[in-house]
């Protein structure tokens, strides 16, 4: 393996950390309806557990309402049960045709709690980037130990990697600030 392979592997891991952060932010309940809040909730139907998005259409008819319309009406009760059991604090209403979830407006206390969650998710993403950087640095050290690259090449690769890491950490910070602003907006 070469320096380029190590860099490419690290870059893929950095992108995964950003994607995971974005998914985490999408799942936060910020007072506005978002299909990502419920689309991955597992529902026990047809003898197996499947995410809601595989058995129903999810729409946002109003700013604070999520509507879930199963393709098979027999799945209404299992969907409702799964949403209640997901621990998101959502109260689904089954009207016989679809399941509706009305999101309550957020209190100031809840907004402050969500900001803490945003910061934790951002820190977890930075940890993911840091771990991928550590793996890449170890890869470079191994290449140096195997005499496949020189010490100057190793130092250059470390420096280039750190530049990329700094860019990803900045991106994480920007995403966190934007999400915090989103959460605190009434």
Image (cartoon, rainbow, N blue to C red):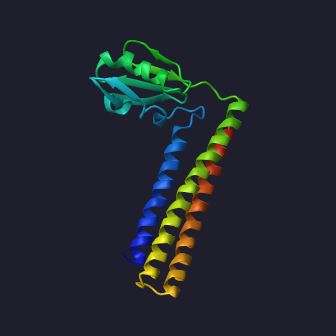
Please state the horizontal and vertical placement of residue 134, each as a whole percent of the image: 53, 66
The total number of labels drawn is: 0
Q: Is residue 186 visible?
A: no
* Nearer the observer, 178 or 28: 28
Q: In this view, which residue lies farthest toward the front?
A: 145
Q: Quadrant of the N terminus?
A: bottom left
Q: Where 154 falls versus 109 (above or below)? A: below
Kindly identify the residue that appears in the image at 56 percent across and 66 percent down.
Answer: 165
Q: Where 71 falls versus 53 (above or below)? A: above
Kindly identify the residue that appears in the image at 45 percent across and 55 percent down.
Answer: 16
Q: In this view, which residue lies farthest toward the top?
A: 96
Please state the horizontal and vertical placement of residue 105, each as a whole percent of the image: 64, 27
- Quarter of the image where one finds residue 3: bottom left
Kindly identify the residue that appears in the image at 39 percent across and 77 percent down.
Answer: 2
Q: Quadrant of the C terminus?
A: top right
Please state the horizontal and vertical placement of residue 51, each as a whole percent of the image: 37, 32
């Amino acid at each position: 393996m070469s320096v380029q392979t190590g860099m490419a592997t690290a870059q893929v891991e950095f992108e995964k950390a950003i994607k995971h952060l974005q998914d985490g932010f999408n799942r936060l309940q910020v007072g506005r309806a978002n299909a990502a809040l419920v689309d991955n909730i597992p529902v026990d139907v047809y003898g197996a557990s499947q995410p809601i998005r595989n058995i129903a259409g999810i729409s946002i008819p109003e700013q604070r309402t999520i509507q879930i319309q199963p393709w098979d009406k027999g799945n209404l009760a299992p969907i409702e049960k799964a949403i209640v059991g997901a621990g998101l604090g959502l109260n689904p209403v089954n009207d016989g045709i679809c399941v509706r979830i009305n999101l309550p407006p957020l209190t100031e206390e809840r907004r402050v709690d969500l900001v803490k969650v945003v910061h934790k998710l951002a820190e977890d993403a930075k940890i993911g980037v840091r771990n991928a950087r550590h793996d890449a640095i170890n890869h470079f050290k191994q290449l140096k130990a195997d005499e496949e690259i020189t010490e100057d090449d190793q130092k250059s690769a470390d420096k280039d990697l750190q530049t990329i890491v700094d860019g990803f950490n900045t991106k994480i910070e920007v995403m966190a600030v934007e999400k915090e602003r989103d959460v605190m907006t009434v």
